[in-house]
Image: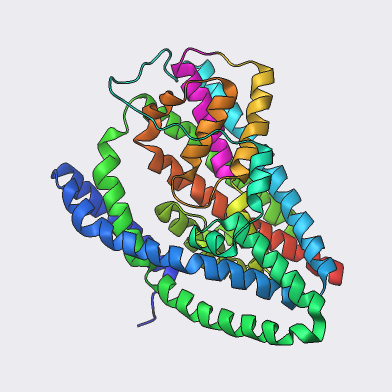
Amino acid sequence: MKKVSLPVQILIALALGIAVGLVCYFAGAADFTAKYLKPFGDIFVNLLKFIVVPVVLLSMIDGIISMGDMKKVGAVGWKTVAYFLCTTAIACVIGLVFANIFNSMSLFPSNLSLQEGAVWDKATSANFMDTLVGIFPSNMWSAFTTSNMLQVIVIALLFGGGIMAAGEKGKLCRDIVSTFYAVIEQVMAFIISLSPIGVFTMMAWVVATQGANIIGSLVLVLLCAYLGYIVHAVLVYSMSAKVFAGMSPVRFFKGAFAAMMFAFTSTSSAATLPVSKECADELGADGEISAFVLPLGSTINMDGTAIYQCVATIFLASCAGVQLGLGQMVTIVVTATLASIGTAGVSGAGMIMLAMVLTAMGIDVNLIMIIYGVDRLFDMGRTCLNVTGDIACAVCVSKWEGKKRN
């Protein structure tokens, strides 16, 4: 028999996970999934988190030194950042448009109050300058142990540039990086092969434990967010791949499917990096460029998070009975864009940054408790969108660089 491909295995695991989750939910056996299925998913996610830092560090250094020219690194870098900033701003606008449409149709509730006893640990207020300072590490090992991806990327850029600047004297370091990266790729391939197990166990747990809580207004705000996700993916990502890379939307989504499904279930764009790399390369992205773009994208390209923050802010403002004007909408776009750039590529990080946006808008942060229980369902869609955008960027930048070389 022909071996079943990984994307098909993931799709089967996704369907089985939903089926098992529904059975456990209606049978009142949600505890079974939490005790006996979710731990296997946690093990898989832990393995991915274990491999993320060495993959990002070594792949970026290897990608930089493989380019052989600092001018090329700079060219790829500014094009990547420009693409991400533009798509994030568009994502904010899409999120605000859908949220205001739902709100104008009175689909969002007004003047809701928190249940008695509900408590939210407020996130520490952050701003752009704090984020900028935090990018640069004071301790290399601390950046590794805390998985601070922005700092890991800076370390990779510094070491990659240093090896290139050293010329012939840096040859040994160049060889060591290439050798270690070859080993890490084999470890990564083994972990990726376990992804159907992780998808099945995590999906079964999510459906079994949270299925019944999606009622009333939460269904509407979820629908609003997912409409924004879908529209952004179709209009921005697939069209940019079509216009800039000459790739049909069907081919693009088919090639990115494995990474999208894994991101949807793992809710971690950083943990999805190995799968994203394979998908981007199969779609024709330059291996060196994807090794540079994808780790950077997992940290600063958070279009799904931006849409979520805009929709959630309008929803919670409505719940608080607050009407936001045009000037405040612009503030949301700017704040959400900066907040999404500073959002870590791990599960649930978007909720912390939402607190920052709410604080900037003067909305009670405790209102987050209204949607906190179903945040994972938002997180699944926004992470899927984030990863899709990373792959689209890698494909487009590869095409631009290919044209320039030709």
Given residues 29 and 332, the one toward you in this image is 332
Work out which quarter of the rendered image holds the N terminus and state it. bottom left
Lateral position of residue 207 relative to residue 92, left or right? left
Q: Is residue 51 above or below residue 388?
A: below
Which residue shows up at 28% across the image and 40% down it?
Answer: 211
Which one is nearer the viewer's eye here, 121 or 214?
A: 121
Left or right of residue 163, residue 184 in this image: left
Q: Quadrant of residue 3?
A: bottom left
Residue 115: % across, % down: 30, 21
Which residue does the image show at 64% across and 32% down from the upper left?
335
Judged from this view, the residue extending furthest toward the front is 138
Count all numbered tags in the image, as a single digit: 0
Residue 212 in the figure: left or right of residue 307: left
Quadrant of res 154: bottom right
Name the image quarter holding the C terminus: bottom right
**Does the image show residue 287?**
no
Q: Residue 201: image x %, image y %?
A: 29, 58
Answer with left or right where residue 55 lies relative to residue 203: right
* Residue drawn 52% across the image and 30% down it: 311
Q: Is residue 344 above or below residue 190?
A: above
Residue 210 visible in the picture: yes
Q: How is the image coloured?
A: rainbow
Which region of the structure is painted magenta?
303-322
Residue under the point 66% across and 54% down: 136
Q: Is residue 314 magenta?
A: yes
Q: Position of residue 239 (x, y in %)?
A: 68, 50
- Choose between 243 and 406: the one closer to the eye: 406
| Residue 67 to residue 171: above or below | above
Q: Main secondary structure of the magenta part?
A: helix
Q: Position of residue 90 (x, y in %)?
A: 67, 38
Q: Is residue 53 found inside the magenta-colored segment of the image?
A: no
